[in-house]
Image: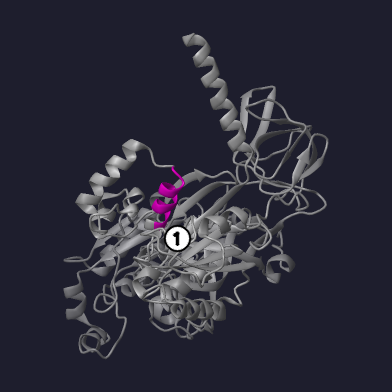
Amino acid sequence: MAVLASSIATDTLQDYLAEQEEKPLLRFITCGSVDDGKSTLIGRLLYDTKLIFDDQLATLERDSARHGTAGETIDFALLLDGLEAEREQGITIDVAYRYFATGERRFIVADSPGHEEYTRNMATGASTADLAVLLVDARQGILRQTRRHAFIASLLGIRNIVLAVNKIDLVGYDEAVFGKIAEEFRAFAGGLGFATIAPIPISARHGDNVTANSAHMPWYAGPTLLGHLETVPLAGQDLGRPFRLPVQLVTRPDQDFRGFAGQVASGRIAVGNDIVVAKSGRTSKVKAIVTADGDLQAASEGQAVTIVLEDEIDISRGDMLAAPGDRPQLADQFMAHLVWFSAEPMMPGRSYILRTETDSMSATVTALKYQIDINSFSHEAAKSLHMNEIGVCNIATQSPVAFDSYKDNRTTGNFVLIDRLTNATVGAGMIDHPLRRATNVQWQALDIDQNARAGLKHQKPAVLWLTGYSGAGKSTIANMLEKLLHASGRHTYVLDGDNVRHGLNRDLGFTPEDRVENIRRIAEVARLMTQAGLIVIVSAISPFRSERRMARDLFADGEFIEVFVDTSLEECARRDPKGLYRKAMAGELENFTGISSPYEQPEEPEIHLKTAGHDPGELATQIAEYLGKR
């Protein structure tokens, strides 16, 4: 009998899971400003739909007594505010995901943080959502963070939004308050492209209009929040979109099998269909579609598969398989909307790592076209983006990227920017379109290359990059070094920071943004000169490690030699050969390195020159000897 009961229980469980799997799935996010009640709302949804187990409820009651903010009643927010730091501060820091289901649908809800500092977490949660529940405190009305989250939701492709006017009980269930907030939201969100906007007055704490209509608001005749979530139209799969599969892994368990694994980002693929590799343009046919549950004849959007081709083609992680008749864009320059996450501002010209669904490469924000004002959505001129700001940028990548516009495909049109030094994610982007210059300007192959030019000069090209404070002695050492190399028959050129600013960089000032562009231009010129076979000596303060790293990455291994001219700031100020330190200390010079702008010392320079007690000629000889040993 026990075996029979176990068998029946197993069958019942399997039937239940199968039934749940067949229900449509809605992914949604709760967002809004701090303390608008997002976590409380989700906790109330789980409680009212009977999805809290007895032991969880007991723990919740105990935690409510210890951490709660709802008096003697249950504090539903504690169901989601799992981090101790969140409980102590009373705010959500991370994105918490919860699953629940009703008789109509399955739901995955992301509870995002409301604090402005954690806007990046909200963007993460919104990137996969179909709908956003935007909470507004009825006492506060529409806030700046409300506008920011609404704009980001629109930017990230969310087309359905619920305006949940929460804490309506604290304003006496006033219809006029609700109407005013709803009207204001519709006025500013009208141009954001939402397909549906559903204002609903709720009290998450007491459950009004969450899962059941409230007796306190007879004037409201619309659906409950849960009722709306169960009935809002879902976009569903669009099999008419072109086939895309970003290759996440090349699997080769033995010499007879070579497959390309990934999740179908859009469209449909079947055995026998033609495909093209987006970057190389090589074509083949699908021989087999392999999954963990067996081979398939066809696969569509959202399925994880391994595709086997009829031909041996060079494909690696970062490539994209596509429909030959409707290929993705392939470009190394494009325009994109960018949400900036880092406390360090985004500066045009600075090098970052750009990471797509499967690809990774160096990239530079070549221009910040404008910043978007969150209050008015107007376009404003700006030189940089600060934390949580949104702008439209031109981006150049070191190698071509295969992509679609984000509005056409959220999976193949998004990217993140990674700081090269800290490996932190500093920004998230949505690609708008390729730049025309990326498609009509091609690299021209030349028969005479760097090796041929260097061979004629009987030397190995290099760039000697002298960095240090103003007055450290860089220019003096560079001048003496060039005389030494010239006397030994070397072909050289000195790119002095001050001299370059008289011509090529005369349009640049000394703001952090202009300093970045100054170094980018110098590095590009030095690169061209090394390709001509020259030994280039750069003398420039170059205060930021990220720009020196960007310069290094332009050169082949061993070609870039960083020389740290290490003179203390006190000694440089004492020398003050141009009188600049005196002016900077008097407040007459802004953004002066070491006084009002930082200098980031090299961590592992190839040559470390400690100038104290040494003659410049002696230091120049040290560099020449190092170069000779190469």
Please, what secondary structure does the residue beneath circle 1 have?
helix
Q: In percent of the image, x 68 and y 51: which residue is there?
A: 236
The residue closer to the viewer here, 103 or 436, is 103
Q: Amino acid at mark 1?
A: Met
- Left or right placement of residue 408 versus residue 464 in this view: right
Residue at 38% from the left image edge and 38% from the top image edge: 53
Q: Could you tell me if residue 95 is visible in this image?
A: no
Q: In the rendered view, would you say 128 is above or below 13?
A: below
Seen in the image, is 295 located left or right of residue 199? right
Name the residue at 26% across, 72% down. Answer: 472
| Residue at image mark 1 | 122
Residue 202 in the image, given as x and y percentages of width and height: 44, 65
Which sits in the foreground, 106 or 471?
A: 106
Q: Position of residue 321 (x, y in %)?
A: 71, 45
Q: Is the residue 578 above or below the residue 227 in the image?
A: below
**Magenta highlight on residue 45:** yes
Q: Is residue 169 highlighted in magenta?
A: no
Horizontal side, residue 405 vs residue 549: left or right: right
Instruction: Locate residue 337: give its quadrant.
Output: bottom right
- Position in image of residue 172 (x %, y %): 37, 74
Residue 33 makes an appearance in the image: yes
What is the span of residues highlighted in magenta in the rendered image?
A: 41-50
Front residue of this view, candidates 501 and 145: 145
